[in-house]
Every structure is written in C-alpha cells, then in structure tokens.
Amino acid sequence: MLSRYRKISPSVLLMIGAALMLLLVNSSFILILNIYLRKMGYADTVIAQYNSFRFLGTLLFAFPLGIFIKGKPLKPFFITGSIMVPSVSLSLLYCLEHGIELFIMPLFVLWGVSFMIYNVCSLPFIMRSEPEEVVTEAISLSYSTWSMAMIIAGSLINILSRVEQISLFGHQIVFDEYHTMFTIGLLGTLSIFLLIFIKEAKPRSSSDSFFANFKVMRNDYDWVLIGRVLTPNMIIAVGAGLTIPFVNLFFNSVFRLDSEDFSLIGAATAGIVFISTLGIAGIRRRYGFKTAIMFPQILAILFLIVLAMTQLVSHLSWAIYVAIGAFMLRQPLMNMAGPVTSELGMKYVGPRNQELISALSSSIWSASWFISAKIFQYLRQLEMDYYQIFIITAVLYSVGVFFYYMLINDFTKRDQEVEITAPPPQPRV
C-alpha cells in the first residue's frame, strides 16, 4: 500500500504539507472555539450564527473562484490562502477576546474565504500533477492531512492546557482557549515557506478571461453530470452541518466535557481517521467504488444513531463511554469515504469540468453548512434536544448514500460501455 504513496510528486507533497500547517489552525478552532465562545457568555443560537457566517464567505466566492482558476497557475492562490488563514484567524481571536463586535462578523466571512481558496485549488492541482496510477493515493493523502492536523492540534491543546503559565516578554501567559488558539494560529504561517518550492504542471484545460468563461458556461460544461455528482454531496453536507460543527457543544452540554477533554478525544479520533483515510485507497482499488463508499457510510450512520441515543441515558455512568466510542468510530467511517467520493466525482464529470466541480463542491458544502447552522440555530431556539437534531442528520445521510449508490451504478455502466466500444489494441510490428 505504501509503495504507491512514495510515487506522489514532490510538489503535491509540499502542497499537502502546507495544507497541514493551515489545517492546524482550522482544527484548533473546530475543537475549542465553540467552547471558548460559550465561556465568553455567548448562547448556542449566537454561536450557530457566527458559524453560519463562516460558511457564507465560501458560499459567495467558491463558485466564481472555480470559474476564474480554469487553466490558470494555482501557486499564487495557494500563497494567498496561506497568508490569509493565519492573519484572519489571529485578527478574529483578538476581536472576540476584546469584544470588538463591529469586526467579528466580517472576519468570520473572511475566515471562511481564506480556507476556501485552498480547498477549491487543491483537487485540481492534484489532478493536473499526478498520473492516473497515483491519483487515488494523492487524494487520500490530501484528505488525511485533516486527520493529522486534528491529532497534532488536539494533542497541543491538551498539553498546553496543563501548562499553568509562562513568562513571555515580561507578561504572564496562561494557556486558556484564547492563548492556545492564538499560538496554533501562529504555526499556520509556516505554510508560506513550503509553498515557495512548488512547481506546477501545465493545466489540462485552456485559460480564458473570467467573463469569457462565464459566457461559455452553458455549453462548455456538462451540467447534467455535474448535477448528478453534487446531489448526494449536497444532501450529506446539510446533514453534516447539523452535527459536525456542534458536536463539541453536545459533549459539553450533555456530559460536561471541557476543552482539554474534548481535544484529546478529537486527537485520538483523528488518529483513527488518518489510518482509515490512507487505507481506503487500497480498498477502492481492490473492491471498487461501491464497497469503498457504501459500506463505511452505512456503518457511520448506525454509530451516529448510537451517539444520539446516549443523551437519553446520559445519567447512567456508562453512557459517556458509549458516546465517546460511537463518536470515535463514526468519524473515521464517514471521513474515509471522502477521498473516494471525490475521485468518483472527478472521474465522472471528466477533465474539462474538474475545476468547476471542485469549486461547486466547496460552495455546496458551505451553502449547506450555512443553511444547517441557521437550522441548528432555529431548532435550538425551539429547545429541540441534540439527539433529535442528530437523528435528522442520520436520515439525511441515508438519503445521500442512496444517491451515491445510483451514481456508482451509472459510472460503472458508462465505464463498461467505454471498454466495449473502445477499438482493440493494434498489434506491434
């Protein structure tokens, strides 16, 4: 399995390494930002509103960016994102800590935009740079950086929380949530130094002006194929947006887990995600798309239901262990299918649609999570319990998995038809 990973090009490895630095920032925010906001006195409804504005930035700009980057070098976009992520993150933390309400909403929007730039460009960069024999491995390794970042960030949060205080330039610093996220935010600047050494492959599609690309959109892209790929993506994204950003609030509210406890659970879970994400490439090659996508996601749905039901028995001593176990199994099972569904989508739509499908996927996820954050905010205002919201997620996941089942069947059928109609190989003279 590892022999194929060794064939990944140095430029893709540098891009993935830079992504790891940026995802450290994102992971630390995912793990403890909501808990930090709650300690600052914000209600669940306000926290959900802040999260929704993060996704609004990606919703507004991902689609235009996907049109703009078609046929263009991607290195400048990576560098732009690597500058924006730490600078916007640190500015946001400063405004939250000092109560500068005027800039909080705009900075949440910019925070989403900064990560969106990297997300939109990474898949097209891999598809341009790697031969078919290692595309699956390159995408899997790219996805695994999220897990590795979560492991490192969760471990750092837990370690720093045990440091009582340090003296820096005459100031005594206690590593609470604010100072921990601020410290990890500074690590994100290391990504810039890795990106300097990237060398790009030639784009596989032609480059036109931004407005010219908009004019030919109707005929230049295969919208039926794109729509089929995005449908299950959108359904699953809406469900995920009701759960993933707020699962730390679930554990904090139901089982009273604090930042350092949840970060340790998140780090351990990410370790399982990392291994499973690297292993899914071999499963896909051996058993095909159907097994690699369907089987993990069905199991993930079952564990999500178990996680939700623990709220009903939270007064029992063993409930917290069942909840942690279900969370630690659900997360890798759902995430390990990500690289395979991305590869399926890229191959299904073909080379000329790949920049657009990458941008639309980011836009769809952000749009869905924006909608989900608003739904979560509304449901919590109605005092709906967490377990009921998680069950809604499970239902949406189930519908999305069914659509993936139909998409895989259609792709397999098309692939077989291409093999049948392909001309036989000519004998060598």
Image: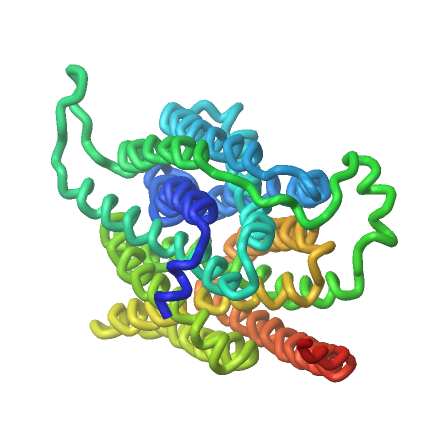
Front position in the image: 337 or 385: 337
Height in image: 131 above or below 417? above
Residue found at x 57% / y 35%: 77
- In the displayed structure, would residue 151 be above or below residue 426? above
**Farthest front residue in view:** 429
Q: Report the side of 188 relative to 65 (left or right).
A: left
Residue extending farthest to the top is 170
> Could you tell me residue 371's position as x and y percent?
62, 52
**Viewport quadrant of the C terminus:** bottom right
Point 79% across, 60% down: residue: 222
The image shows residue 267 at horizontal and vertical percentages of 28, 56
| Residue name at image x 52 percent, y 37 percent | 78
Residue at 21%, 47% in the rendered image: 158
- Asked which quadrant contains residue 26, the reply is top left
Lateral position of residue 170 relative to residue 52, left or right: left
Residue 410 in view, yes or no: no
Q: x, y percentage for residue 223?
A: 79, 60
Q: Quadrant of residue 250?
A: bottom left
